[in-house]
Image: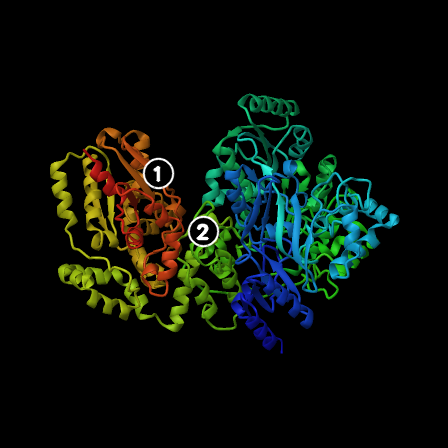
Amino acid sequence: MIKNLLKELGRELSGELHTDELIKALYATDASVYRKTPRAVAFPKNVEDIKELVRFANTNGVGLIPRTAGTSLAGQCVGDGIVVDVSKHFTQIVHLDLEKKQVRVQPGVVRDGLNQYLEPHGLFFGPNTSTSNRCMIGGMVGNNSSGTTSIQYGVTRDNVVSLQAVLSDGSMAEFSSMDLNEFHEKLELDTLEGELYKGIYKELSDRSTQEQIIADFPKPSIHRRNTGYAVDELLKNTIFGESEEPFNFCKLLSGSEGTLAFTTEITLQLEELPPKLAAMVVTHYQTLEDCLMDVAPVMRHNLHTCEMMDKVILDCTKNNREQLKNRFFVSGDPAALLMLEIKADTKDDLAEQLKALQSTIQKSARSYASPVLEGSEINKALELRKAGLGLLGNMVGDRKAVACIEDTAVALEDLSDFIGEFTQIMKDYGQDAVYYAHAGAGELHLRPILDLKKSGDVGLFRKITTDVARLTKKYKGSFSGEHGDGIVRAEFIPLMIGEDNYELLRRIKTYFDPNNIFNPGKIVDAYPMDESLRYEIDREEPEIETLLDFSDSEGILRAAEKCNGSGDCRKSEHMKGGMCPSYHATRNEKDTTRGRANALREFLTTSDKTNKFDQKELKEVFDLCLSCKACSSECPSNVDIAALKAEFLYQYQETNGYPLRAKLFAHNTQLNRLGSKVSGLTNALYGSSLLSGLLKKSAGVAKERRLPKVSSFNFNKYLQNIKNQFKTNRDKVVLYIDEFTRYLDTDLGKDAIEVLTRLGYDVQLFYAESGRTYISKGFLKQAKKLTLENMSSLKTFADAGIPVLGLEPSAILTFRDELKRFSSDTETTKAIASHVFLFEEFLSKEIEKGAIGKENFTKEQHTVKIHCHCHQKALSNQKVTFDILNLIENYKVSIIPSGCCGMAGSFGYEKEHYQVSMQVGELKLFPAIRKSNDDVIIAANGTSCRHQIHDGTGRKAKHPVSILKEALI
């Protein structure tokens, strides 16, 4: 019955309604420990769609679970009703009022995206969560988010001016500030909105109710308090208190987790941009106790940030390529550290504040190191801190740092004592814990380390949460500071605020939502906190054999389970980094790293098939993955979707067969080898619009693509000729002639030989197929055979200490990355990995040593813009390419912040992927190149990238090696 009703609902909506198993599985989890499969997932396009959903929910007794980025840690975004995702269509910045310094937005506007829009106007929205590059304003209002800046700019509730919302009867209401007369006018309304004002007036006018709220709610000095509905905030106005502040229902709706109304527009109060000058002192401590003792004295200064990280999280950063470089300021092995940021408009003021802060730190004498960071160093440190919660997913195995007590907030004067008692609770349970805090606000992200697949630890999950709730109550703290009650803490609200106050919250919920359609099971009448967990308790772990070695994660299932839902992969193309290009193009959850990992976990766990990979849903989620590897470095949990996709393709095709086109692309090197023997004929065929059109049509290649020309060349002979002309007086290097250079980019190979030889290096050539085409299409047996064959030669070079230099990043970096998944000989794979280099990596090091100077190159003036290959960004860095081109004295070099080009080997050639491929290119790369003058040199070291640039812009890009060769004198 409900299925037919949902189909009918889908026809009524302007947006989309999904009831398929894949989408429901993707939306069954958020960043919490919970899993509830919804009946459907809706993507409303307009307010009328939301009203229709409300009508349907009332008629059929179905809950509506609002969702934006889905990064909630307490289970707010999961439920068994209809998940309503507004992140796709409710993304407009409606109006900016510069005079009032206010902005009106829809709930799907991303916080950092909003601030990018506001920056030219000298304004910004203050609350700053660790998820700010993908979290959305609607979610921030729902959770009453805070973040690192709350000690200066308050919490979200403090900055909400008005809310437009759909009420539970489908009517619209605008909630904003009002004086006594306006309030009483609302009492006269014969509508649901009027009933809300009558209800709250009836409840809060009672003096005894006010007294019980004041007596039992958290201390007012704790500004991060989000336990239940904020009825204590509603007492601070001219209606119910002695304050001159106007009444505003937004105080209550902020932090209500979508349980009272469905927000459609939000007006925010903005701040002027903070002072541009800043310094950060990072104090290091031998003990956690010393760290916490320093919080109160340093908070006497005008800090903009006061954040704490402990050893557990700091150790997690060592295993993340992206964050490893942000550890530069960490001295020794601290048990904890504090990040203390000050800001000023003048250098003198900054120096004065810094001196005073350092004096306080010196007087306390508790820290053993206190480096001062400036400029971009501060941003790197804050990036490390922001990645903290996500980095906890790096913990290998089933024991994880669990979010349950991670949102406690106490008054600063109680902080040290509270931690002391908390630590004793952990000791009593034989528990290690993670300490991670907005220390300046008294907010503690404390996490026990538990295995929620085991009933014993699930029992501890409840016991620890209960004991810490009681401890928090003892200090009159808030059990939910900024992450919300959700499922994990809502059960404890009666304990935290008393039964009478809890019954008040229930009555308020009934005024707003008598049929309980808005996010049921949250805040009041809560779901049990130890049920509906992500994993089946005491299950027999599925044994899943793979060809690739995932032992670094204890198997492929745990590799997928490393995703904790933090949603870093949902950041847009306007944010730093390249993850995740297909999501940037489609804005679909299934095209994120999180979506793919969740789907793989779901079906590997629940499938009853012999081959658990044999799922059409998995084929769908991996289809648009470009295997760019950005997730392997940018995902805090290092979820490597490229490796997971390769294994999936292999397993799926083993059962369902290998398609013809996949065979053509996988065996492309063999075809190129044959074609190069008659290159003239082959290229004539490829160049003929008629014949190449037929070839592309039969192979499923996009008709818009040019087929790359093949060639044959004797590199050995060429090398000998070059050696005869130039004296080699430097060390021996091995130039790797990969399959792309050998048959498609022979000129590039010639340029590399010439550059190395003319610079004095003794060049030896190494011919081998990297296996990249096999890996990308899931032909893992063939790839493994090639890789193991290559290991013998590569080991010889490594043993001799000879560097192996590669031109095509996707080929040479195979020996640094995939090699370790094909071979169990860890010692050899590590030795090989440390001796293979991108051409640019090697030359950059030589430049750094002073072995190569600008005197080798022209003094002509040129402008160069660089686009680097995705695998280089993920496994190396872009700076090495910048460094070698910037060596040329009069070359003005810059890096295009481009993300993925969109070609990704064969991906962009496949007709069904062509459109997405070009969409990805159009996000940043193509526009940047089109804006460049015709005389600007475009550098791109990926062969696919160069073809994509030509197809997308008509410009010819050059490999950095070719640019160096042309600049040699």
Residue contact at pointers 1 and 2, CB within 8 angstroms: no
For label 2, count other residues whose C-alpha is less than 10 Å away and answer few (under 14), some (14-19) or many (20+).
many
Pick whichever, 771 or 478, lies toward us.
Answer: 478
Q: Where is mark 1, residue-wise? A: 894
Q: Do we see residue 485 in this rendering? A: no
Q: Given the image, on which type of amino acid does mark 1 rest? A: Ser
| Rendering coords of residue 124 (x, y %) | 56, 40
Image disc number at residue 579: 2
**Which of the pair 512/103 is nearer the observer?**
103
Q: Relative to residue 736, is residue 303 depicted above or below?
A: above
Residue 283 picture location, percent across and down = 59, 30
Tell me the SS state at disc 1.
strand
Which class describes the residues within 10 Å of circle 1: few (<14), some (14-19), or many (20+)? some
Looking at the picture, does residue 535 appear above or below residue 275?
A: below
Q: Residue at x 21, y 60 (%)?
A: 672
- Quarter of the image with the C terminus is top left
Report if residue 798 is visible in the image.
yes
Q: Position of residue 179 (x, y in %)?
A: 76, 45
Q: How far apart are the two marked residues, 1 and 2, measured between alpha carbons?
A: 21 Å
